[in-house]
Amino acid sequence: MDKQLINFNGQIVPSDQQILSVNNRGFRYGDGLFESMRYMNGAIKFPELHIDRIQKGMKVLKLDNNSHIDSWFLREKVEELVRRNKIGNDARVKLTVFRDADGLYTPDSNKTGYVLESQALNDSQYTLNPKGLIIDVFDELTKPINILANLKTCNSLVYVLAGVYKNQHALDEVMILNQNGFLCESISSNVFVVYDRKLYTPALNEGCIGGVMRQVVMRLAKENNIELVEAQVNPEILNEADEVFITNATKGIQWVMGYNNKRYFNEVAKFLSEKLNQL
């Protein structure tokens, strides 16, 4: 098997080559953000939504040259890396941007560095999981609501510890709560709940990631006359809901089968997944 390549600040290098020093701010302080994307049938899905979120995040972190990472940059760099890695037409792509500067907490500049990675996938469409997920609520650590909450920053300890909890309890996924004890998101996805013929999802001011697939699914729901409510969502709804599903840019929609003794259907998840694959 050929060694995988990455793009580090414009240079194509082997993925196992040492590229970061101990002084790297992404390593030291989590001073950066990242974007996971789906490359499908030879193109990035929803590139404008991804670029919009990257640029907004870079502005919040006060990184220089946020406008340089645009649609042209994304398309050219991803296509080059996929071609060099001989991946084919379907892949998971991750772009990480970080403050490439010296200094302790206070940086001496706001220069931007980046790493682009790619990983081959077998599916040329979004695939709804045939077996539903078994979930629980992770409440050992909650997520704060602030200006960073909607971004996918390199500060990810809430998700890491949620993942440890998931493994310890042999679960497929766990739900993360915000600082007020309401549903926020899952480890790597946004959350949707079907209850009383309405589709609920935590509002952005509840601290959830402003997911690209969240935006797409919300649009699909509205276009297909599914009543959508962005709100403060009490975790107790998991005991009463008809359906629960999660969404992210690489997997699309994944349905949940069970929480404690509660079992869910997947009718809306299946319908929206079919509509998603028509885009």
Image: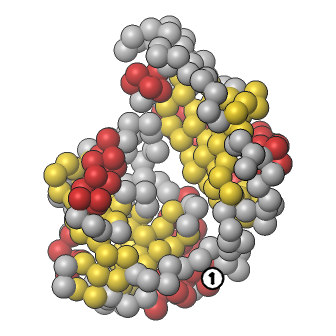
Instruction: Point out residue 72 in the picture as x, y percentages from the top left corner.
Output: 80, 43
Residue in the foreground of this view, choosing between 171 and 212: 171
Above-or-below relation of 62 to 57: above
Instruction: Point out residue 275 in the picture as x, y percentages from the top left corner.
Output: 63, 82
Instruction: Point out residue 58 in the picture as x, y percentages from the top left corner.
Output: 55, 33
Residue 69 in the figure: left or right of residue 135 = right
Name the kind of residue labelled 1 in the image: Lys
Residue in the foreground of this view, choosing between 81 and 255: 81
Asked which quadrant contains residue 224, the reply is: bottom right
The residue drawn where x is 32% and y is 54% is 163
Image quadrant in which the C terminus is located: bottom right
Residue at image mark 1: 275
Residue in the foreground of this view, choosing between 209 and 162: 162
Asked which quadrant contains residue 201, the reply is: bottom left
The way the protein has been coloured in the rendering is secondary structure
Residue 255 in the figure: left or right of residue 223 = left
Above-or-below relation of 68 to 34: above
Q: Is residue 38 visible?
A: yes
The residue drawn where x is 19% and y is 85% is 261
The residue drawn where x is 61% and y is 84% is 274
Number of numbered markers: 1
Single out the residue that lies furthest toward the front.
1
The residue drawn where x is 80% and y is 59% is 88
